[in-house]
Each structure stands twice: as C-alpha cells, then as structure tokens.
C-alpha cells in the first residue's frame, strides 16, 4: 500500500491520537476497562501499513521517512498528554507543587517507559508474510517489552508503580484472576499481546479481502495462531474465575469486619482545626460500625492526621481511647515518627481495646513519590 507522505503522516498522527485516547479512557475516572484490549490497535495498524508492509516506496536510505517523524512525534506527544490526564489529580497535592508534578512526572514516564514501546513497533512488528512461529515470537517479545518497561518503572528513580496497564481491569473480576499466577504483570502482558494479535489478524483478513477484490490470490492464510494464543490467555483467566467461584460448602465465617473510609484531603490535616474535624469524622464513622457489632474496625492509610503519629502522645492516646470506648480492636494505617532520628514511617498498626497500640508493626519497605514523601 503506497500513499503520499502527507496522507501517511496524517494517518500516523490520527492513529496514535486514537490509541492514546483509548489508553487514557481505560483508566479512571472513565474506567472503560475494555478499551485496554484495543487501545494500541490503531497505532499498530498504522505501523503495519506505513512501515512494515510498505516496501514499494523508493527513498534515500540515509534519510528517515517523513511520516516516521510524524509518527514518533505523535507517539511522544500522545503518551505525554495521556499521562498528564491520568495524573492531573496531583494538582491537589501540596499545591502549587502538585502542578509541577502534573507537568514533570508525565514527561519522565512517557519519555522513558511508554514512548519507547511505540517507537519499537516499526522495528519489531512482523511482516504478515513471515511464518507463524516468527510472528508469535515477535508479538510475545513486544508484549514482554511493555511489561519490562512497566516493571522497571516500578523500581527505578525510587519507583513509580502507579497505573500499570493491568490496573485498568480492577473492576473486571473475571479478567484479573490470572494475577494469582503472575501478578499485575501477566495481566498487562495479556492485554498488550491481545492488542497485537487482534491487529495482526485484522490486517491479514484485510489483505485477503483486498486481493479477492482485485481478483488475485494473496498467498496469506487467514489462520493466525497468535490470535488464538491471545484468546487462550484471556479465557484462562476467566476459567480460573469460574473454577474458584465461592461455594457454600467452602465458606467459613471467621469474623465480622467494619471498614471506615473518611473523605478528607491530606493537605488539610496539617491545620489544627481541620485535624480536629478529621478526628471527629473517624470517631463518628467508627462508632456507627461498633453499633453493628463488628469484631474489628479497619481504618485506611493515613485515616487520622499525619501531624499526630500513632507513636506520639496525642495520636496514641486518641486511637487507644477510641478502641477502648468502642470495645473493639482497630487495624489502622498510620504514621510513626522518631524524635531522635527524625525518621518517619508509614505502616499498619494493631490497636487492642485492652492493651492499646501493639509495639510491633509493619512499615512500608518501598516508598513511592507523592505517597510517602515528596521528591
């Protein structure tokens, strides 16, 4: 397929823009998780048409194709803008520093961990004329590259493990069961491999129909084992879900837990009056749960003001008195602070209604930017 440079460039830009729109919409607040199964298809097909299968255009091999520059520019801009949208909520965190994060963090994430994958598509996508094993190997390699980039992002530069592609499926219980085998990484792999396989299958069907229309033989089989491999990955997760559906004979009542989820902006907890209000909200919600005769009350991370760590007098006294008054143990996420070393830790603590705060606690081992500290 041969098209002019201007049309080719426009095709590349539109395809990439559509891909990143689908990518962003797969996550919250839109949460259209199904878009994760198709988000990369427009960009993949553009690469197939313009770079992988387009071998008829004479050009100077020392100069890049003009539409390759358009594709790469669109991929960089698209990945950056998509991540600006995904992280725009950071503007509320420690303003105005949050706005700086909205501008700079997407630049790091897109340029190092998202754009490189799209830049690799023209180089790594297989030709439709290649044998099935070669195609399967290359598509698996591309899906593996996506997962590798996500994994590196979760550790390098202190780590930024937010929003791997697999997290887009958090409300689709059946599709995330494979996480029991390989964590979020296998879900991301499945989603990317599915995108690649569907694009390959669709392009093969297009070639066959095009040749039929021109009254010729394409010499290409519609059979695409990579497509069936992708379906197998998807159905394997669903089979795991069905196989592990709750059964009455397997159910055992262990305890009755009550969860408290206060809605309170973290930055406001540093204000004394608002910190007192925060204590009041947690108190009221916990008291309502205690009236329902729960066996334990669960408080989320930083449910109480971080300026009053659980190991210092004000925070410790308040949480212990709450557990004692409600006669209910509390499991809470909270902060500790060592006055001598000035070290703070973000952990999980058990508060007994009889003995108070348990001295042994779990602290997070790997802190993330804008969660436990500000870079």
Image (cartoon, rainbow, N blue to C red):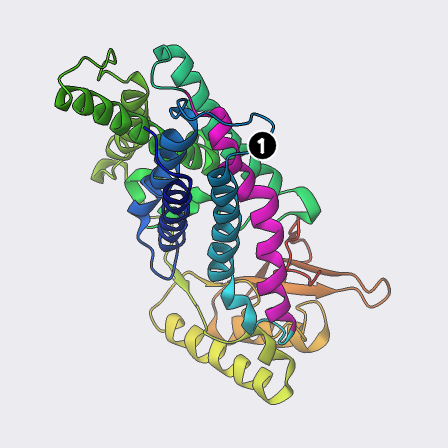
Q: Is residue 42 left or right of residue 94?
A: left
Q: Quadrant of residue 207?
A: top left
Q: Which residue lies at the image location 31% right of the left edge and 44% below the top edge?
A: 173
Residue 282 place in picture, x, y as percent: 49, 76
Residue at numbered disc 1: 63
Which of 83 and 316 lies nearest the eye of the viewer? Answer: 83
Q: Is residue 324 above or below residue 50?
A: below
Q: Which residues are magenta?
A: 97-126
Which of 152 and 113 lies nearest the eye of the viewer? Answer: 113
Q: Is residue 107 above or below residue 9?
A: below
Magenta span: helix, strand or loop, mainly?
helix
Residue 322 place in picture, x, y as percent: 53, 75
Q: Quadrant of the C terminus?
A: bottom right
Q: Quadrant of the N terminus?
A: top left
Residue 145 place in picture, x, y as percent: 52, 30
Q: Secondary structure at mark 1?
A: loop
Q: Which residue lies at the image location 50% right of the left edge and 55% below the top edge?
A: 83
Q: Is residue 266 above or below residue 189?
A: below
10 Å crowding of disc 1: few (<14), some (14-19), many (20+): few
Residue 363 place in picture, x, y as percent: 66, 53
Q: Residue 190, can we see it?
A: no
Q: Residue 202, can we see it?
A: yes
């Amino acid at each position: 397929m041969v098209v002019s440079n201007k049309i080719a460039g426009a095709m590349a830009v539109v395809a990439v823009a559509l891909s990143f729109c689908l990518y962003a919409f797969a996550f919250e607040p839109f949460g259209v998780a199904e878009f994760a199964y198709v988000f990369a298809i427009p960009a993949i097909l553009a690469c197939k048409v313009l770079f992988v299968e387009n071998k008829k255009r004479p050009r100077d091999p020392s100069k890049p194709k003009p539409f390759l520059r358009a594709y790469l520019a669109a991929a960089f801009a698209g990945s950056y803008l998509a991540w600006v949208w995904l992280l725009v909520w950071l503007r509320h965190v420690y303003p105005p520093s949050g706005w700086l994060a909205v501008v700079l963090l997407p630049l790091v994430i897109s340029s190092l961990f998202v754009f490189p994958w799209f830049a690799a598509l023209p180089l790594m996508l297989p030709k439709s004329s290649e044998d099935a094993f070669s195609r399967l190997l290359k598509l698996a390699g591309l899906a593996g590259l996506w997962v590798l980039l996500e994994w590196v992002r979760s550790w390098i530069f202190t780590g930024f493990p937010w929003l791997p592609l697999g997290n887009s499926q958090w409300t689709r219980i059946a599709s995330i069961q494979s996480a029991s085998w390989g964590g979020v990484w296998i879900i991301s792999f499945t989603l990317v491999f599915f995108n690649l396989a569907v694009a390959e299958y669709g392009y093969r069907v297009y070639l066959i129909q095009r040749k039929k229309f021109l009254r010729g033989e394409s010499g290409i089989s519609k059979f695409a084992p990579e497509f069936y491999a992708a379906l197998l990955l998807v159905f394997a997760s669903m089979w795991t879900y069905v196989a592990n559906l709750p059964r009455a004979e397997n159910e055992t009542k262990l305890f009755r837990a009550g969860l408290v989820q206060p809605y309170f902006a973290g930055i406001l907890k540093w204000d004394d009056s608002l910190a007192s209000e925060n204590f009041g909200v947690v108190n009221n919600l916990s008291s309502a749960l205690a009236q329902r005769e729960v066996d334990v009350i669960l408080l989320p991370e930083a449910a109480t003001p971080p300026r009053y760590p659980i190991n210092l007098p004000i925070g410790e006294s308040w949480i212990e008195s709450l557990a004692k008054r409600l006669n209910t143990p509390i499991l809470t996420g909270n902060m500790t602070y060592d006055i001598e070393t000035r070290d703070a830790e973000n952990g999980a603590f058990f508060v007994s209604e009889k003995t108070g705060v348990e001295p042994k606690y779990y602290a997070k081992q790997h802190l993330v930017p804008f969660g436990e500290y500000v870079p």
